[in-house]
Amino acid sequence: MHMTPEEFRKNGYAVIDWIADYMEQVEAYRVLPDVEPGETASKIPDHAPETSDGFASMLADLDVVVMPGVTHWQSPNWFAYFPANVSGPSILADLAASGLGQQGMLWSTSPATTEIEARVLDWLVDLMGVPQSWKSDGPGGGVIQMSASDATHAALVVARHSRRDDGPVERMVVYVSNQAHSSIEKGCTVAGIGHCRKIDVDEAFALDPEKLRAAITDDLARGLVPIAVVSAIGTTATTAVDPLEAISDIAQEHGLWHHVDAAYAGTAMICEEFRGYQPGLERVDSYTFNPHKWMMVNFDCNVLWVADREPLIDTMSILPPYLRNAASDAGDVVDFRDWHVPLGRRFRALKLWWVIRYYGATGLRAMVRNHVDLADQLAGWVELDDRFELFAPHPFGLVCFTHVEGNDATRMLADALNASGSVAVTPSEIDGTCFIRVSIGQTHTKERHVEGLWQAINELA
Amino acid sequence: MHMTPEEFRKNGYAVIDWIADYMEQVEAYRVLPDVEPGETASKIPDHAPETSDGFASMLADLDVVVMPGVTHWQSPNWFAYFPANVSGPSILADLAASGLGQQGMLWSTSPATTEIEARVLDWLVDLMGVPQSWKSDGPGGGVIQMSASDATHAALVVARHSRRDDGPVERMVVYVSNQAHSSIEKGCTVAGIGHCRKIDVDEAFALDPEKLRAAITDDLARGLVPIAVVSAIGTTATTAVDPLEAISDIAQEHGLWHHVDAAYAGTAMICEEFRGYQPGLERVDSYTFNPHKWMMVNFDCNVLWVADREPLIDTMSILPPYLRNAASDAGDVVDFRDWHVPLGRRFRALKLWWVIRYYGATGLRAMVRNHVDLADQLAGWVELDDRFELFAPHPFGLVCFTHVEGNDATRMLADALNASGSVAVTPSEIDGTCFIRVSIGQTHTKERHVEGLWQAINELA
C-alpha cells in the first residue's frame, strides 16, 4: 500500500526531472495564466477515488490540471508584487526537511532543528549588520515564523500583552504610515487592538515624524493608550523608507514598542551600502524580514528578531505536562514553540542554511546588487522618456512609474502588459494616482528580461 | 552562480536517494537522539561562508551535523506524542509545490492553488462525513491553515470579533475542558480574551456538560461575557471525547461559538465506525483537524472548516489597492488570504490531493483501522497483565497505562523505555497520577513493532 523506498526513488527522480524541465521551460509560459474561474476545479472529479489513482496519473495531472492554472512567480519575466523566489538549494533542502519529518516545537523533539535555526539566524545578524545583541547568546534572539503577517501580528500581541495593565485594548493605539502593509492593520484587528492610526507621509512616501508626534499627543488628550509604532524599511507600494531614528526618539519618549517591517528590503542589508536605510536599530524592539521573498529561500521562511526575548516568551509560553522534559526544565535549551502562535514547527532552518552555504555571502550580495542595478537601469530609461514619469524613489529593486497622459493611460498600459502574457507587473494607486510597480528581483531575471520588458512597455504605451 | 537545471537534476537525485536510504534505515537509529544541548550547534561555523561551500559538503553535513540531532518521528518505533507522519506521495507533492513556487493568497495569484484546495477540502467533507453545508458551494467552507493552533486561534478571534459590541474583551470567557490542548488557552491569551475557563471532566476525561452549564451561569452572574466553547474529539493526554450534542445544546442556549478540536482524531472519521464520536456536527460553528498528524500528509497541513464563512472573512479581510484585481472584484472567486492571519500561502493542497489519490479512500481507511487494531491489541495485553492498569479508554490509536506500583514505577518505566533508544513514548500526568502514553499511528508501524514495544515494556517494568 505504501510507496516503497525503491518506488520513492523512481518517482522522486521523475518529480525532480519535472521540476528541472519546468526550470528550463519557464520562459515559454504566459507569465499570467489564461484561465477562467472554475476551469481548474472542473478538471477534478467531484469525489475522492476509492482506490489508488496511481503515481503516473498524478504526475501527468501536474501538466493537465495544474499548469494551466499556474501564475509563474518563478518566471524571469515576473515583475509583479515582490518576488517569492525559489532556488535549487532551497528546494532540495525543503525536500530533505520533508523526508526527515521533524517537529521542532521543543529542543528535545528535534535538537538539530532548534540548534541549526538559532545558529543560522546568528549568521544573519552578522551578514545583515543588525545588532549583535539580537544573537542567541544575547538578551534578544531570532526565530523563523511563517510569514511577515505572522511575525508582525506576534509583535503587536506582545506589545499589547506587555501593556495589559495600562488600559482596555479598545483604547490602545498602534501607529503606522498610511503606506504600511495591510498586515499591520490586520494584525491590530486580529489582536483586538482598538485603533490602527495611519500617519501621513512626506513626498517620498515616508512617515512624517512630526505628524506621528502630533497624532500621539491628540490620542493621549483623548484618553487613548499608544502602545506601538511600526516602521517600514521598504513599503509595499513604493519601497519607501521610514525615518527610523526620528521614530525611535518618539517611541522612547512615549514608551512605544517599535517594530520594523523590512519584509522585502531586509535582504538588501546583506550589502553594506544599503544599511544607511536602517540606522539606529539598537533602539528598536523587533524586526522582521522574509528570506522567502528576495533571498531565494522558498516559502515559507520569515525571520523575526526581538531585542529582548523575555516579553515574547512571557506572552507565548504555555507548558502542559505532556510537553515537559528534562532539557527544558533545566533551562539549558530554547523551545521555539514559545516564540510564536503555532506549536508544531517544520525544519525550515535547513533551507535557509543551505541557501546561505550554496551562494555564500558573496553570491547573495551579487544577486541583490544585480537586481538593484537592473532597477536603476530601467528607472534611467523611464526618466529619459517623455511619455513616462517616475512616481517614487527606487532605493531597492522596485521601479514605480506613471504614464504622463494620466490614470487611464497608466491603467491601460498595465493591463496590456499583463494581457500580453510576456511579463507581469502590478498596477497600484496612491491618493488617486495610478502607477505601475515593476519589481525586479526574480532569481533568474537578467538584463535581457528587463530589456524585453522595456520593449513591451514601449510598444504598448 | 545559480544551480543549473542539470545540476538540479543531479543534486536532486542525490537528495532523493538520501531520503530513500533514510526510509530504509530509519529503524537502525536510536528513536530519541543521544545528544547534548549545544552539540549540533558546535559543529557549525560561527560565521556564514564568504563563498560557496559546494553542494557535496552540504549534503554530507546531513549525516555529520544533522542526523545525530534528529528525533526520529518517522521511525515505526515512534510511540510518543501523536504521529507527525510523512509519506512518499506527500513528500513528492511538497517537492513539486516548492518547485512551482506558487503564492496562493488570491485566486489570481495562483488559480490552481486556490481551486485544488477548495475541491480537495470538498472531497474530505464526503470522506469524513462532516456536514455537506461545509462544502465550498454551501454557506461554509474549508481552508488549509498551518497548524491546529493557528486554526483554533483564528476561530477564537472570529468569536471575539463577532461579539465585540457585547463587552470588553477582558470580560469575555471561553470554555474548554481541563483536558483541552494548550493551544486553546494560548489562543485566548494571544487573542486577548480575558478568561479561559477550564471545566472539570468525568471519569473518562470528557467534559462534564452540567459543570459547563454551572460555570456559565456563575460567570453571567458575575457580569462576564461567555463567547465560545471548544470541544475536543480526542484530547491530547488521553484522546477523550467531549459530548458534542450536550455542548451544542448549551452553546445554542447561550449564543456561544462552538469550535471542535479534532486535531489528531479527525483523520479517523474517514472510517464510518468512528463517526459516532462526533454526532450533531450540523450545530457546530467550526472544526479543525490535522492531515499532518495521522493522514500521512507532511507538516504543515491543517484543515479548518466553518459552518458560515461570512464572520471569518469579515474578521480577516483587508483589501489594499495593490491586491485588487478583476476576478476578486467580480466576486467570482475565493481569496484564501481572507481566511487566516498570514497573507502569503504555499500550495499545500497539492500534497493533500496526492496523498488522497495515492492511497484512495480504501487505503486511508485501512491505515487508520490497522493502527486502531494494533492499539486494541496492546491495550488487551496491558489489561491482562497484573503489573499494569489501563489509565483511560482508548477509542483511537492511543493507549494510556500506569504501573500498579505507582508514579515512581511508571516514570521509571517511561524513562527506561526512552533511554533504551529502541522506542519513544510520552510520560504524562493528570491530577497527580503519572501515566505512559503510547501513540500507535506512525505510517510504517506494524504488528512486530508493537510486539517489540510490549517486549521492552515487559523487560524494563
Image (cartoon, coloured by chain):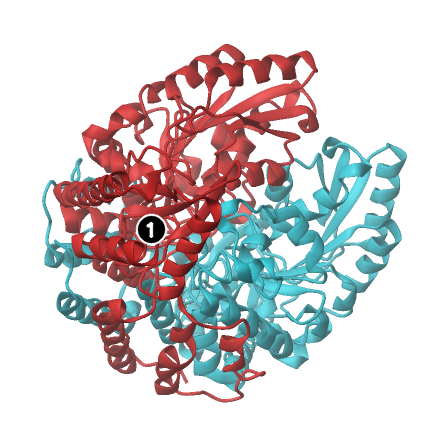
Chain colours: A cyan, B red
Q: Nearer the viewer, residue A393 or B213?
A: B213
Left or right: B289, with A125 as reference point: left
Left or right: B116, with B233 as reference point: left
Label 1 environment density (alpha carbons within 10 Å; few <14, some 14–19, many ≥20): many
* Image spot of residue A307 (x, y percent): 72, 63
Please report the residue visible at 33 percent of the width from the left and 48 percent of the height from the top.
B438
Q: Is residue A357 above or below residue A72?
A: below
Q: Look at the image and tell me whether residue B255 can be seen.
A: no
Q: Nearer the viewer, residue B64 or B456?
A: B456
Quick one: quadrant of the C terminus of chain B? bottom left
Left or right: B346, with A361 as reference point: left
Q: Look at the image and tell me whether residue B224 can be seen.
A: yes
Instruction: Determine which quarter of the picture holds residue A133.
Output: bottom right
* Image spot of residue A392 (x, y percent): 65, 62
Quick one: quadrant of the N terminus of chain B? bottom left
Q: Is residue B415 above or below residue B279?
A: below
Q: Is residue B234 above or below residue A21?
A: above
Report the number of numbered marks. Answer: 1
Q: Kindly identify which chain the residue marked by label 1 belongs to.
A: B
* Image spot of residue A282 (x, y percent): 77, 68
Left or right: A66, with A461 as reference point: left
Please report the residue visible at 31 percent of the width from the left and 70 percent of the height from the top.
B29
For the residue marked with disc 1, what is the amino acid?
A: Pro
Q: Nearer the viewer, residue B444 or B227?
A: B444
* Image spot of residue A338 (x, y percent): 58, 53
Task: Give the secondary structure at mark 1.
Answer: loop
Q: Is residue A41 above or below residue A330?
A: above
Residue under numbered circle 1 = B83
